[in-house]
Image: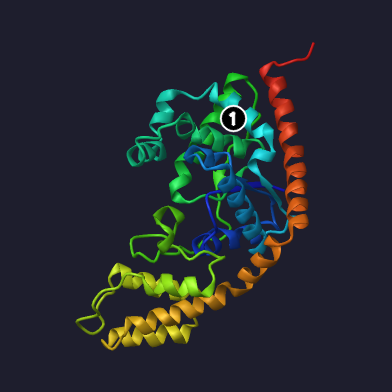
Amino acid sequence: METVVSGIRSTGNLHLGNYYGAIQNFVKMQYEYNCYFFIADLHSLTTHPTPDNLHINVKNVLVEYLAAGIDPERATIYVQSDVPEIAELYLYLNMNAYLGELERSTSFKDKVRAHPDNVNAGLLTYPVLMAADILIHKATKVPVGKDQEQHLEMARTFGNRFNRLYNKEYFPEPYAFNFSQNLVKIPGLDGKGKMGKSEGEGNAIFLSDPPEVIRKKVMRAVTDSGPTAENQAKPDEIQNLFDLMKVVSAPDTIAHFDNLYNTMQIRYGDLKKQLAEDMIIATAPIREKINDIANDAPYLRQVARYGAIKARESAQKTIKEVREIIGFKSF
């Protein structure tokens, strides 16, 4: 059975984009692949979270992974920092990663431009840690978005470089993988692109958002003054609202508002009220599970410990073999 590895940074709650874009695919994958899903708390250290925030964010993501349908009996779900072998492999890979190739990373250059006062070594070597996350389980399939494809290419580079350096075909090449050929892309409420935490709280609908928060966010969504001609093309911010409806609303509801837009009779307030209520209904089952799981501390401890044990079984085998290949031997 092929191995799949994927992670999500512990920088806050999961949103509709995570759920419909990736998590639903994870739920399907766990029945057909050997899956490792981790919470990337080590990666989050590049932004210097406080200890309290770090722990709360890790808990939130763990709770929401479980509420969204990840089964700890089928998939290995674990916290990255609970598997110290990842940090050890990160060290070994760093010894063979070159400054020039790390500086050419698109994500590193973007971070430098966005946060010039926080250009730390963790940002520079972020692709190496990501490679360690993947190679520690010798994964061949990695669900990633377009923005992570360069990192995955670098993971192949580091793995192949290790193989060449030690003249042993040890690490397999990992490749981008999507369970579904038609990935659902969830737009943000600001009309500027995909839904995401990095775009601000108001851009995303989080799975844990209570109904009143969802209503407020949707009602603040960007709109224009309305169509000026029948059947005219929708501007991005309006198309985004209709795209969100395609995810959570019934087909006849979408057709109703589409007809109102095409006949210049639409009232955006009515559209947003309907969208908000449909979002509330769509997220209600997950929200209820989030509340139940978040209050079950013994269960969360059990899941985290079980996941760490399973992940370390795989990671320890890899590290043992890597140390032997490199030449580390006990006297």
For image coordinates 76% across by 44% down, the residue present is 310
Can residue 9 be seen by looking at this rendering? no
Residue occupying the far top of the picture:
331
Task: List x then y, in percent, for residue 115.
Answer: 36, 39
Q: Nearer the viewer, residue 316 or 298?
A: 298
Q: Which residue is mark 1?
A: 90
Residue occupying the far right of the picture:
331
Local crowd size for mark 1, using a 10 Å CA cut-off: few (<14), some (14–19), many (≥20): many
The relative height of residue 66 versus residue 162 in the rendered view (above or below) is below
Report the label total. Answer: 1
The relative height of residue 89 versus residue 294 in the rendered view (above or below) is above
Label 1 secondary element:
helix
Task: List x then y, in percent, for residue 245.
Answer: 44, 76
Q: Amino acid at mark 1?
A: Tyr
Quarter of the image where the C terminus is located: top right
Horizontal side, residue 244 vs residue 209: left or right: left
Horizontal side, residue 262 vs residue 171: left or right: left
The relative height of residue 25 versus residue 125 in the rendered view (above or below) is below
Looking at the image, what colour scheme do you see?
Answer: rainbow
Q: Nearer the viewer, residue 179 or 329?
A: 329
Residue occupying the far left of the picture:
228
Q: Nearer the viewer, residue 161 or 282?
A: 282
Task: List x then y, in percent, for residue 307.
Answer: 74, 47
For image coordinates 30% across by 73% down, the residue present is 223
Q: Quadrant of residue 220?
A: bottom left
Can residue 164 be seen by looking at this rendering? yes
Task: List x then y, in percent, for residue 217.
Answer: 42, 70
For image coordinates 48% across by 72% down, the residue present is 214
Q: Nearer the viewer, residue 271 or 324?
A: 271
For image coordinates 43% across by 73% down, the residue present is 216
